[in-house]
Image (spheres, rainbow, N blue to C red):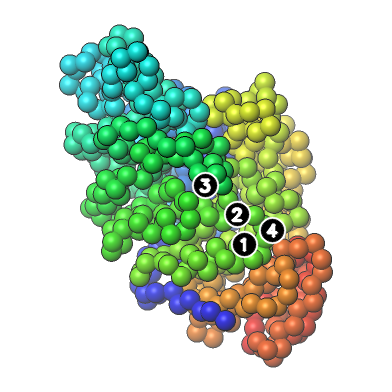
Amino acid sequence: MKTYHPHGTQNLKWWQTAVFYQIYPRSFQDSTGDGIGDLNGIINRLDYLVDLGINAIWISPIFPSPMADFGYDVSDYCDIHPMFGDLETFDRLLDEAHTRNLKIILDFVPNHSSNQHPWFLESRSSRDNAKRNWYIWRDAKPDGSVPNNWVSMFGGPAWTWDEKTQQYYMHSFLPEQPDLNWRNPEVVEAMHNALRFWLQRGVDGFRVDAILCLIKHDSFQDNPPVTPGSYWEMWGHTLEPRYTVEQPEMFEHVRLMRRVFDEFEERVHIGETGTVDVSGLIPYYGRPLDGYDIPFNFKLLHADWHAPTVRQILGDYYDILPAGGWPNFVYGNHDIHRFATRYGYKNHRSVAMLLLTLWGIPTLYYGDELGMEDVFIPVAQRIDPWGINMPEGDFGRDPERTPMQWDASPHAGFTSSEPWLPVADDYQTRNVAAELADKQSTLNFYKTLIQLRRSHPALHNGAFTFVDGLGDDLLAYLREAGDQRLLVCLNFGDQSRPIDLNHLTSSAETLLSTHFNAHSGTTFTLQPHESVLLQLK
Ligand code: GLC
């Protein structure tokens, strides 16, 4: 039995024991009747989040944007999109959240701005404009073709021709998202000041977007073809982005950004990482710990729902964490199909059981607490720019971004008019109001689980010990702190599994079961796909 002892548990920072919750603001709650969520809507739902028990809200971008990539194309880093509200409403959101002991995390998109950002408009206005070098411009090859073979993460070349100034500009994503030139110190200063603008207002931290693309190799060499079976091939790439992602200077910028956070008290620095394998996360922590507090760990998110696979990933990760580095886990976000769909509805509560009982910060995605599933969007109605470029059989990211289901009224209580993406067909039964009224609903399961996490220090900073050998399809681990001794046991399979805990304890009581069963004693049977949190003697 291998045990991991969380380090430095005496003076934990607020974020080390927090449960994070991601809001995709367009889809959470509309207050104006335009079919798109907004900040007032979030304010109106803060009490729901308090009742759910989470501690911190990460809100995807709410800044002015032409919405080519639904907000990940920012045209002003220091304001609020009128569709979402204004700075005054934002300040009210901060106040209302802080009054309720909720933290607010914003999304920072440093790699690229919108092509409508005044900086880019200036940059493309002429070759000798003072902001020309704020973006990445290159000459065409002698035959007029693109400067090299680099491609956009969303498909197609990473270069777009500018007729007026007769050069190509580079974009890691859409042509509407030109990459900023982080080799230019003026860009660095302007972007650091954008962070300060919000941190001074009282924002509790940032999730930093697409950092892996921040710096491009200055040789501008062609990228090589992908190795068959590699991570990049899995993502549908034909080229390995050797010269376009995770350049050493990028990590230096993570550290420099971190210093901006450190000018303020108690802010959290979260990064969207690239995770070929868990060891790839380590440089994002910095050395020693001067990078991200929370380098998002997507390894489980991309893994099969298979007990030995999950066991392996957890062990590999805990084994290599740097001294003082705190783990974290993500199972869903606005870029990946909902896990209730990926792993099958029958497993969705077990995913929550795992995420909320591991040693490591959990980040939840809005609606997963209701058991929301992907909503099928016919090809002709796709609006996600990535999805539009996808082959027929894939669906892009619209399915996981549909409106939150609040109640059984028209449009699920999300809006009074036609929502920007369709509401799921099942909204009349799967919604917050209905689930609050049903003691054994997924929502009440989440609420109890989060409450148990909050009230048991063993679950956030207790020692973690794998209990191997209980049986096939099972993953089990102990969480222990002081006199708290908890056992989590997950049945990943579709067979009932007898459990014998005699070698571990003289008595066990169920604190929570995905099936709301009340097992007790040292031997019992887990139903297919059932997971339990037990209190041991
Ligand atoms: C990140 C975001 C994704 C966005 C992309 C470009 O991966 O999570 O939604 O499209 O960056 O900004």
Q: The residue under label 3 is which amino acid type?
A: Tyr
Residue ranking furthest to the top? 164
The type of residue carrying mark 1 is Thr
- The circle on residue 459 is none
Decide: few, some or many residues near mark 2? Use Cα within 10 Å; few <14, some 14-19, many ≥20: few
Frontmost residue, 122 versus 163: 163
Report x, y in % for residue 369: 64, 52
Q: Quadrant location of the C terminus?
A: bottom right
Front in this rendered view, residue 20 or 123: 123
Rendered residue at 21%/15% (across/down): 127
What is the spatial separation of the Cα atoms under label 4 and label 2, in whole angstroms?
A: 17 Å
Going 80% across and 62% down the picture, which residue do you hit? 494
Q: Which of the two marks, 3 or 1, is nearer to us in this view?
A: 3
Q: Which residue corresponds to the image point at 48% horizontal and 55% vertical from the top-left?
A: 277
Give the mark nearer the N terminus: 4 vs 2: 2
Label 2 lies in ligand 1 vicinity (Cβ under 8 Å)? no
Q: What element carries label 4?
A: helix
